Image (spheres, rainbow, N blue to C red):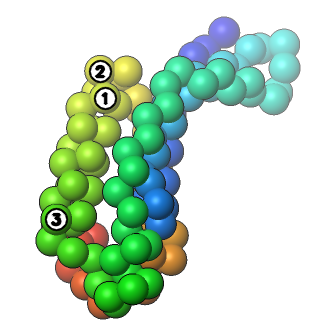
Amino acid sequence: MKIEKLAGIDIGSNAIRLLVSNVITDKSSEIPSFKKSALVRVPIRLGADTFLKGNISDANKNRMVKALEAFKLLMEVHGVSKYYACATSAMREAENGLQIVEK
């Protein structure tokens, strides 16, 4: 049996979420099983900025960066070997979305 820790980060319009999962592979089965290890949600409300003002405010940008820094530490503590992050339309449609991604 092999257990690997994987994580996913969802940067949504209302909240940013981190899911840490144990992926268990067994020699007797080709299909791995997934067991949730941790789920953290931080309500940032990026959509309120983007859809009303066209860009993400400095305050929410700073909150998002701090949340992602916290997620990095949580992934280290959990021993995550790989992760993937994706953003929804609030981040993609914001005029300053690319600058925030670079930060």
Residue 4 can be seen, yes or no: no
Q: Residues within 10 Å of mark 2 (few under 14, many from 20)?
A: few
Please give the label number shown on residue 74. 1
Residue drawn at the location 47% of the way across and 66% of the way down? 13
In the rendered image, the residue lying farthest to the right is 29
Residue drawn at the location 65% of the way across and 22% of the way down? 35
Secondary element under disc 2, as helix, strand or loop, is helix
For discs 3 and 2, the disc positioned in front in the rendered view: 3
- Please name the residue that numbered disc 3 is placed on: 59
First in residue order: circle 3 vs circle 2:
3
Residue 28: percent from left, percent from top: 84, 13
**Residue 65 in the figure: left or right of residue 85:** left
Image quadrant holding the C terminus, namely bottom left
Q: Are marks 1 and 2 in contact (CB under 8 Å)?
A: yes
> What amino acid does circle 1 point to?
Leu
Where is 86 relative to 23, above or below? below
Q: Quadrant of residue 36?
A: top right
- Please name the residue that numbered disc 2 is placed on: 77
- Number of disc labels: 3
Q: Are marks 1 and 3 in contact (CB under 8 Å)?
A: no
Secondary element under disc 1, as helix, strand or loop, is helix
